[in-house]
Amino acid sequence: MPLFKRRIRVYWVSQEGVPTMNLQAEATFKVDSWEEAIYEEFDDGRKFARATIKKSFEGDLHGEGSLEYLMAYTADGNASFVGMEFFIGGFGKLIGSFMMQHVGTFVDGISTVSLTIVPGSATEELVGLRGEGGFDFGHGDEYPFTLDYYFD
């Protein structure tokens, strides 16, 4: 039995009268490195931080990601964050790169992230790639990742 199944969902979205098919990619990622630095801290425990993250992907997406997060921590240690990620590698059998915008929260040790492919950022065989997805991650080794996508 394969580790990853590709599920296809069809949405009829009129784009100049042409139906568009949305697909879903599934992968896992590992955090290869995480470097976090506080750049402003307040007396009550709140703080701003920046993190530089390197990731590796396996599955429908296979390659490497470079990610920058800006985080706002509350006094209780929870946080809200935004980030930009550059992915390079394979998307199924297609090769190229693209950028993703992240928005998320960190609550009780678990991050929940929604992401959107930056329109117009895809290169090579991935030109026209659009989509959104998300994932949760904590202190494990691998994390599942899903991305609903289509090509313009």
Image: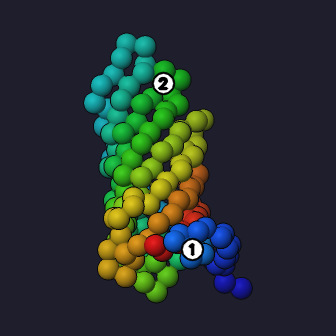
Q: Residues within 10 Å of mark 1 (few under 14, many from 20)?
A: few
| Residue type at tag 1 | Gly
Discs 1/2, front: 1
Which element is circle 2 on?
loop
Query: Is 8 drawn above or below residue 117 in the view shown?
Result: below
Sequence-wise first label, 1 or 2: 1
Image quarter of the N terminus = bottom right
Instruction: Identify the colour scheme used.
Output: rainbow
Mark 1 lies on residue: 17
Kindly identify which numbered label has been placed on residue 114: none
The residue lying at 53 percent from left, 49 percent from top is 113
Q: Position of residue 126 (x, y in %)?
A: 39, 77
Residue 147 x %, y %: 55, 65
Res. 59 in view: no
Q: Disc 2 marks which amino acid?
A: Thr
Disc 1/disc 2 C-alpha distance (Å): 48 Å
Q: Residue furthest top?
A: 43
Q: Are marks 1 and 2 in contact (CB under 8 Å)?
A: no
Location of residue 151 in the rendering, given as x and y in whole percent from the top left corner: 48, 74
Taking the spot 55% from the left edge, 44% from the top edge, the residue there is: 111
Q: Which mark, residue 74? A: 2
Q: Nearer the viewer, residue 103 or 67?
A: 103
Task: Examine the rendered structure and indicate whether residue 72 appears above or below residue 88.
Answer: above
> Considering depth in this image, is 150 or 111 the residue closer to the camera?
150
Label 1 SS: loop
Q: Nearer the viewer, residue 94 or 27?
A: 94
In the rendered image, the residue lying farthest to the front is 17
